[in-house]
Image (tube, rainbow, N blue to C red):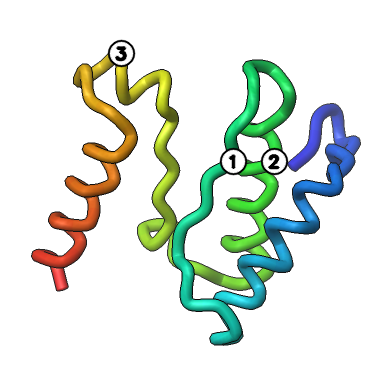
Amino acid sequence: MNYNNEPFRHRSNYYELIKYVDDFLEGKNNNRYFLLPGIRCVGKSTILLQVYEYLIKEKHVNPTNILYINGDNLKRMVNSSIIDGINTYLIFFTIQQ
């Protein structure tokens, strides 16, 4: 990910998430979900977009296998909680398999 052909720098959280993702993909960790809490405008979305790009470009993960939920949008669009959104996704994902 870049802006004006300059790649975004990575924060330490990025590398922590990449290790978590790599451990999962290598079977060292069974947890498929993580939360990245924090106050507004500290870079959470940027870090997640960088991890998304890593999964797509370097690990060749199908984008349909990645779930990103923005809590602000979830609450505003359907008046639902994050837990409700995840449960709905899991039910739908289970049905599709």
Count the marks: how many?
3
Mark 2 vs mark 1: which is more N-terminal? 1
Circle 3 residues within 10 Å: few <14, some 14–19, many ≥20: few
The residue beneath circle 3 is 76
Residue at x 23% of width, y 50% of height: 89
Residue found farthest to the top = 76
Q: Nearer the viewer, mark 1 or mark 3?
A: 1
The residue beneath circle 1 is 36
Label 2 secondary element = helix
Circle 2 residues within 10 Å: few <14, some 14–19, many ≥20: many
Q: Give the answer, above or below, for where 78 lies relative to 29.
A: above
Quarter of the rendering occupied by the N terminus: top right
Marks 1/3: CA–CA distance: 19 Å
Residue at x 55% of width, y 86% of height: 27
Q: Amino acid at mark 3?
A: Arg
User: Seen in the image, is 13 located left or right of residue 68?
Assistant: right
The residue beneath circle 2 is 47
Residue 74 place in picture, x, y as percent: 32, 25
Q: Amino acid at mark 1?
A: Leu
User: Seen in the image, is 89 located left or right of residue 47?
Assistant: left
Residue at x 21% of width, y 17% of height: 79
Q: Nearer the viewer, residue 64 or 48?
A: 48
Q: Nearer the viewer, mark 2 or mark 1?
A: 1
Q: Amino acid at mark 2?
A: Ile
Mark 3 vs mark 2: which is more N-terminal? 2
Residue at x 41% of width, y 27% of height: 71
Q: Give the answer, above or below, for where 85 lies relative to 26.
A: above
Quadrant of the image occupied by residue 76: top left
Residue found farthest to the bottom = 27
Q: Give the answer, above or below, for where 28 lies relative to 64.
A: below
User: Seen in the image, is 44 located left or right of residue 2?
Assistant: left
